[in-house]
Amino acid sequence: MSDPAQRRPKAYPPPQFPPHRPRLFARMPPAVFPVLLGTLGLGLALRRAEAALGLPEGLAEVVLGAAVALWAFAAFGYLVKLARRGGTLIEDLRTLPGRAGVAAASLGLLLVAAAVVPYAPTLARGVLFAGLGLHAALAGLVIWLFLKSPPEAREVTPVWHLNFVGFILCGLTAVPLGMIWLAAALLWLTMPVAVAIWAVSLVQLWRRPPPAPLRPMLAIHLAPAALFSTVATGIQAWLIALPALALGAVLLIVLVSAGRWLTASGYSALWGAFTFPLAAFVSALFALRMDVTATLFLIAALGLIPPILYRVLKAWASGDLALRSNAAEA
């Protein structure tokens, strides 16, 4: 006969009372940063729209001021989390929403630099190089984790654009500050990386389409093409600016055509991936003086980005965003 003790059901600890409540910012979700990146991009697109269309100044600066404040508050919260337990950074980088969010957080610093250029060029320059160094360190950490991961986990994802092509955002600040050399260098360095990611991703998409919850991430593929066009326009590299915008238009048409497939799983925090590529495409259109088309897409961006921002911020405040994105807890 078997021992009766071996047949007993497994003992579980009694539920905690009162329920466990994480400390403030202890489970700060990096998944909030992609939509904040999109909001910063929307403000920069509005700034270009005001200049191109002769609109009264003010709306763009209000949006940028609010976006910078939100990004700064979220960045402060994430720094508090890291100060409590630095290992949460590695844990967040092991999940796709976390990896995208952390990359968007550091890239947000580069857009903050672009936002403050008209007011404090010296500060913008400092923020630009701080963001460049931070993002380079993050890219190195992502490579290290990739090499340490088991072979089955080594897969190229659209988030690689954020990690390894996102440096091109420096061009949005470098050009108005007169650092054409930096914008040109980053343009030539990041284009081959983006092409490689597009090629590998296309093969992966053909062989094994991503599961429905991860499909919104495919929208990230639009961002590099739009940013290449904007930066190339700034340094007057027309042989890059126009083809890059054409590629972006093709990618956007494909994404819109596949909209129902991309959103098959319903709303999630990953919808933040729709925001910053669209904002970047609007800026590229205004940069090339395609004002009528740019205005139409700007209206679309104004209808899409604020509702996603509201839902993400609401989920963040309730704690639901941290739970659904599997954010690490300090």
Image (cartoon, rainbow, N blue to C red):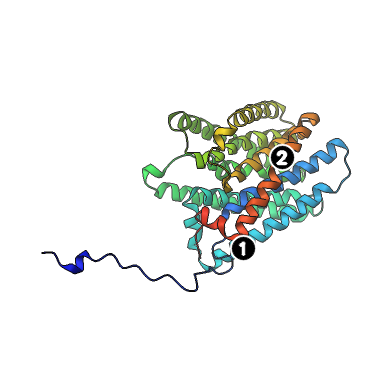
The image quarter containing residue 28 is: bottom right
**Is label 2 in a helix, a strand or a loop?**
helix
Q: Nearer the viewer, residue 76 or 172?
A: 76
Q: Position of residue 111 (x, y in %)?
A: 70, 48
The image quarter containing residue 183 is: top right
The image quarter containing residue 169 is: top right
Q: How many marks?
A: 2
Q: Position of residue 11 (x, y in %)?
A: 31, 68
In percent of the image, x 40 and y 48: which residue is there? 149
Residue 192 visible from this viewpoint: no
Q: Which mark is residue 77?
A: 1
Q: Nearer the viewer, residue 157 or 271?
A: 271
In percent of the image, x 46 and y 32: which residue is there? 204
Question: Which dot, 1 or 2, sits closer to the camera?
Answer: 2
Query: Of the residues shown, which amino acid type is indicated by label 2?
Result: Ala
In percent of the image, x 69 and y 41: which residue is there? 304
